Image: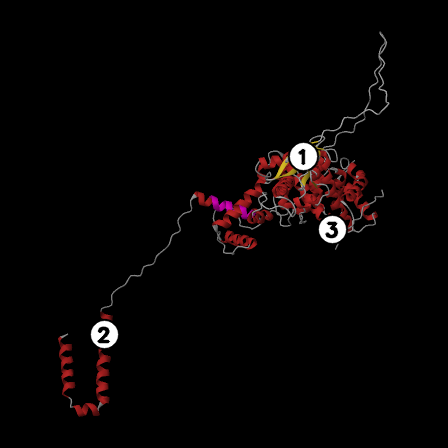
Amino acid sequence: MAFKRITGAAVMTAMLMVPVSRAHAGDEFVGGLVGGLIGGAIGSGIANQQRQKTRTTRSRTVYVQPRATSAQRQTAREIQTSLNYFGFNAGAADGVLGGQSRAAISRYQGYMGYPATGQLTEYEKTMLLGAYHRALAGGAEVNQIIAKSNEGARAVLIAQRDGTTGTRTTGYAGLPLSVSQAVDEVADSSDPSAEQLLQRSGFIQLADLNGDGSTDYIIDTALAGSSFWCNASQCKTMVFASTSDGYRRNDLLLHAPKPDSFDCIGGTCQVKAAPAAQPEANTMMAKAEEPEAGATAGLTLPVFNTAPKQKSLSSHCSKVNLLTSANGGFTTVSDVSNPDFALSEQLCLTRTYAVARGEDIIASVQGASQAAIEQQCDAFGASMAGYIGSLNSKSPKAVLNEVSTLVLNSGMTPEQLRTTAQICMASGYQSDKMPAALGGALLLTALGERPYAELVGHHLHGGFGTDDNADMALAWYEVAISALDGGAAPVFAPSQAERIDVVRKAALGLAGHDMTTPVPAASTGTTMPVFTLSE
């Protein structure tokens, strides 16, 4: 260091001793000298830095994700199960939301109109889990939501998102809110939707019942086609009488109500008393002769030939739907402890789908009233009686061969026959007339739509429209299951992949058969109604 200071001082002294004139004349010399000094200083500094270089230690931060708690894993499993239920494949429900689960979440978000981030917001998670539990709970409302949509179970997601809770906050066009809510109430316990009920003639009648100048409303629940609201001879009639505070509802039992069936004062209504029958004028009442003393009075008793009581499928399904709701949802594959009830649930579910699909077609039928359609379908059911009667004595193959002959000789195109079958199947279920309903299922199966054979199996299992026969029911279930296993498109609840496995397991449990066991072999002209659809 001392050498550096001496050298620096000498240089500076030399610079100061240079004559001024030479400095001006030799700018190049001064520039070179200064440049050399600066360059030397930089070089010296670099050398010093290299000699003084210290050893540095690099550090990095590693973030360790905290282990998920059991509650978090359970929530993740529930999310995965819900995604799988609605057809968004999240893989095994292992409680780890990995790449496959995030991809499923993205598909769910895209379907619902949310940003497809692969990460659920709290709102999106609430919608998903809420819809899942709502679908599992089942019941009439969920069945209606699913049946009215081509989306299957995913329709419950849309209903959950859009706030379709079954409690109406605005009335149908032209109807007060309280009346609209009653319409929804009736629809929830029957197959037709509220919109379809409103289109039925006589379901709602309008009249001024209490003379206050305002319109009052009468709802005849008998036209819903469900025995839920009826006893042996009467059905509930809802009468809405206008008051200064809105409408007051009166629930009354009456068969075929009309506006003149009621006496209403203000908001209170009651059924008019039936007038007593008066004897005709100048009519002498005959007196029965008393038998002579000691004579034996011979009694002549009337004999009534009564037909055997037919089981009501509508009433049966009303009870089944209530039990399904009470049980928290439909029976699953892992919980088939009561095969008979599990098959009853599936019968009522498929019936709902059949009615909904048929009503959509009926809406496009040209120039035919509901009564006319029902009349034609009654004739169709009668024409199928022979085939229905052979269900307990002939194998499915033999019955279908006979129905196929009918198809070939009908003079109608397959599409016309298919339309007829779907319309009459819906009409039969609505009116609780099993020949038309069961005949429609047989015809559709013969036309190549083998999954409809499930309905035939359900009828044979429950004894609706035919004698109950567990062995033959199993044979028809096998026709439908084999078709679905072979790749046929499902015709009922297509989004519920495990549904047919419930049918398979319950049918085996009920009949005690193995599905690999072959079905034992069994030891004309028909007039078909033609319905013209609008374009």
Residue 163 in percent (x, y) is at: 56, 47
Crowding around mark 3 (Cα neighbors within 10 Å: few <14, some 14 to 19, many 20+) is: some
Question: Of callouts 2 and 1, which one flags the residue occurring earlier in the amino acid sequence?
Answer: 2
Inter-mark Cα distance, 1 to 3? 40 Å
Magenta span contains residue 77: yes
| Residue position marked by numbered label 1 in the rendering | 264
Q: Quadrant of residue 49?
A: bottom left
Q: Is residue 159 above or below residue 296?
A: below
Q: Position of residue 394 (x, y in %)?
A: 77, 37
- Which callout, 2 or 1, points to the residue nearer the camera? 1
Q: Nearer the viewer, residue 253 or 161?
A: 253
Q: Nearer the viewer, residue 260 or 410?
A: 260
Identified by mark 3, the residue type is: Ser
Quarter of the picture containing the C terminus is bottom right
Q: CA distance from mark 2 to mark 3?
A: 96 Å
| 293 relative to 535 in the view: left or right | right
Q: Which mark is residue 364?
A: 3
Q: Is residue 123 left or right of residue 43?
A: right
Q: Which residues are magenta?
A: 74-84
- Residue type at the position of mark 2: Gly
- How was this image coloured? secondary structure
Q: Which mark is residue 82?
A: none
Image side of residue 519 versus residue 170, left or right: right
The amino acid pointed to by label 1 is Cys
Query: Marks 2 and 3: which is nearer the front?
Result: 3
Residue bearing the label numbered 2: 45
Q: Give the residue at the far top of this rendering.
A: 294
Disc 3 is placed on an element classified as loop
Most common secondary structure along the magenta stretch: helix
Left-right relation of 48 to 243: left
Placement of 14 over or under 399, stated as above or below: below
User: Which dot, 1 or 3, sits closer to the camera?
Assistant: 1
